[in-house]
Image (cartoon, rainbow, N blue to C red):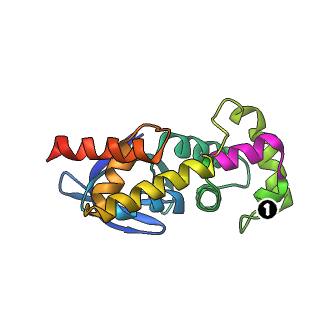
């Protein structure tokens, strides 16, 4: 199995990404969550953690922005009645940590909000995965930290940095307590590169 692919992001859409790796164009099916994290990184190097699905019609490669999303996808794919297409659809609708929280708490309503997931499938997911996902991170990022990142992003864009540069730096930064700390860390990063 391929653990990950690293290459230049040549094309990206809401459900696919094409990475150029050693002169080959690898097409990965991706979730909307992954798309939202990499959509501004066209023509930049990206890493997608992969899952290879072999079927009669051929091989499909699924790509994920982080280990957690791939881990949740793999678990969903093992639930009877949930194949890779539905698992990807679920991860496009719910972020991995929110999905884990819904499974652990038995929140059928959240799961059935996903198109294609009815009560029977939602209950099956909860029953089969409840014990398996308990050790995975389940708290979603607080709205405060998301707002801080967005505020820092806007400030850096206003200072004249490109959207791609800003997104790359924000993806690499560790947690900061304030908007000022995020901006300061990003500026230090830009100063090292420039």
Q: Residue at x 47, y 38 (%)?
A: 175
Q: Residue at x 80, y 45 (%)?
A: 126
> Is 36 positioned to the left or the right of 106 in the image?
left
As for residue 98 lying within the magenta part, the answer is yes
Q: Nearer the viewer, residue 81 or 188?
A: 188
Q: Position of residue 105 (x, y in %)?
A: 82, 42
Furthest residue toward front: 180
Q: Position of residue 187 (x, y in %)?
A: 27, 46
Q: Quadrant of the N terminus?
A: top left
Q: Nearer the viewer, residue 66 or 79?
A: 66
Residue 82 can be seen in this image: yes
Furthest residue toward left: 194
- Classify residue 153 by image quadrant: bottom left
Q: Residue at x 69, y 55 (%)?
A: 82
> Is 154 positioned to the left or the right of 25 in the image?
right
- Tally the marks: 1
Q: Position of residue 69 (x, y in %)?
A: 55, 46
As helix, strand or loop, the secondary structure at mark 1 comes to: helix
Q: What residue is disc 1 on?
A: 112
Q: Nearer the viewer, residue 69 or 41?
A: 41
Q: Position of residue 161 (x, y in %)?
A: 26, 60
Q: Residue at x 71, y 47 (%)?
A: 79
- Classify residue 94 by image quadrant: bottom right
Determine crowd level at label 1: few under 14, some 14-19, many 20+ residues with C-alpha closer than 10 A: some
Q: Decide whether the magenta segment is chiefly helix, strand or loop.
A: helix
As drawn, 1 above or below 146:
above
Q: Nearer the viewer, residue 55 or 95?
A: 95
> Is 2 positioned to the left or the right of 146 in the image?
left
Bounds of the magenta span? 97-107
As for residue 42 lying within the magenta part, the answer is no
> Is 10 positioned to the left or the right of 172 in the image?
left
């Amino acid at each position: 199995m391929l653990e990950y692919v690293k290459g230049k992001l040549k094309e990206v859409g809401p459900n696919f990404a094409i990475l150029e790796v050693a002169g080959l164009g690898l097409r990965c099916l991706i979730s909307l969550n992954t798309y939202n994290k990499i959509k501004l990184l066209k023509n930049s190097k990206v890493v997608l953690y992969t899952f290879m699905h072999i079927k009669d019609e051929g091989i499909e490669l699924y790509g994920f922005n982080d280990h957690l999303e791939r881990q949740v996808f793999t678990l969903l794919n093992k639930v009877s009645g949930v194949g890779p297409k539905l698992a990807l659809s679920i991860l496009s609708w719910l972020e991995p940590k929110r999905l884990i929280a819904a499974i652990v708490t038995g929140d059928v309503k959240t799961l059935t909000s996903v198109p294609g997931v009815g009560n029977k499938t939602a209950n099956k997911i909860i029953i089969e995965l409840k014990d398996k996902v308990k050790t995975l991170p389940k708290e979603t990022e607080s709205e405060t930290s998301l707002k801080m990142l967005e505020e820092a992003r806007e400030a850096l864009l206003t200072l004249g940095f490109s959207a791609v540069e800003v997104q790359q730096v924000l993806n690499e930064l560790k947690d900061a307590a304030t908007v000022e700390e995020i901006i300061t860390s990003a500026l230090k990063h830009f100063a090292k590169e420039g």
